[in-house]
């Protein structure tokens, strides 16, 4: 992780807001019916007994939701603060601290992967490496569910809920991500977009479901 200095500011920013983030967003899936439907579709297509990895898991609320449905889940996040918050709130989830460019997981360890609004913190040149790592830790025919904000904008935050932070949110082009995924060994099975829900930031959101070949 020391090879990615820009990630230090992302890590520190999420450490800073971890407790408040957990308090505010631990139940956010209750207000996101499409996300729940897509996670259910992923769960139904995951090999029984296989572990689902939640990348950029934050405090682990998505991994915990999947665990409630009977899945074995591992949450991986850059932020030690998020991992600590998750462990205290969701003991049914295994948490690991790690970077998307160097995932703390064995080859083929996961039956499926979820990566919701996590690649948005990577530099454009890092996306391919991240997808190669996702391909590596997935078993053959395993599924990856990605979500991200659509566009070309970069939103920088230096203040978040009253805390001092230094973090960029990069909006992404679905066609570009699809091309990158296919170039590292995924087959894209589904792409869709939706408008924001009333309680969300006003951005267009994209979802991609891809299968490791």
Image (cartoon, rainbow, N blue to C red):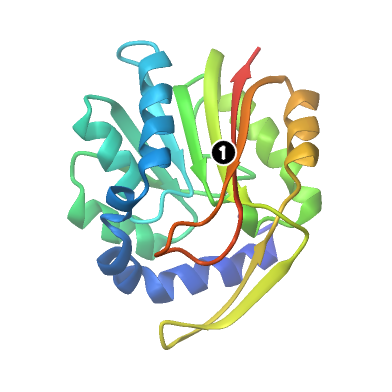
Q: Tell me which corner region of the image, top left, top right, bottom left or bottom right, holds residue 6.
A: bottom right
Image quarter where the C terminus lies is top right
User: Which residue corresponds to the image point at 55% horizontal and 51% vertical from the top-left?
Assistant: 118
Image quarter where the N terminus lies is bottom right
Residue linked to disc 1 = 146
Q: Tell me which corner region of the image, top left, top right, bottom left or bottom right, holds residue 22.
A: bottom left
- Residue 200's x, y, as percent? 45, 63
Number of marks in picture: 1
Q: Is residue 8 left or right of residue 39?
A: right
- Residue 85's x, y, as percent? 28, 61
- Residue 123's x, y, as percent? 74, 57
User: Which residue corresponds to the image point at 25% horizontal and 68% vertical from the top-left?
Assistant: 23
Q: Is residue 171 left or right of residue 161?
A: right
Q: Is residue 109 left or right of residue 93?
A: right
Out of 80 and 31, give the one closest to the viewer: 31
Out of 75 and 161, give the one closest to the viewer: 161
- Residue 199's x, y, as percent? 39, 65
């Amino acid at each position: 992780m020391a090879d990615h200095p820009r990630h230090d500011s992302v890590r520190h920013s999420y450490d800073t807001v971890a407790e408040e983030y957990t308090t505010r967003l631990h139940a956010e899936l209750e207000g996101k019916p499409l996300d729940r439907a897509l996670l259910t579709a992923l769960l139904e297509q995951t090999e029984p007994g296989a572990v689902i990895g939640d990348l950029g898991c934050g405090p682990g609320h998505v991994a915990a939701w999947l665990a409630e449905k009977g899945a074995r889940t591992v949450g991986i996040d850059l932020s030690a603060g998020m991992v600590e918050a998750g462990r205290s709130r969701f003991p049914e989830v295994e948490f690991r601290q790690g970077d998307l460019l160097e995932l703390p997981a064995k080859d083929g360890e996961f039956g499926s992967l979820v990566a919701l609004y996590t690649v948005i913190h990577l530099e454009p040149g890092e996306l391919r490496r991240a997808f190669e790592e996702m391909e590596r830790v997935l078993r053959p025919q395993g599924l990856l569910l990605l979500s991200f904000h659509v566009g070309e904008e970069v939103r920088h935050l230096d203040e978040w809920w009253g805390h001092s932070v230094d973090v960029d949110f990069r909006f992404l082009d679905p066609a570009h991500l699809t091309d990158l995924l296919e170039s590292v060994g995924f087959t894209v099975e589904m792409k869709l977009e939706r408008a924001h829900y009333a309680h969300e930031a006003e951005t267009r959101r994209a979802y991609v479901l891809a299968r490791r070949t």
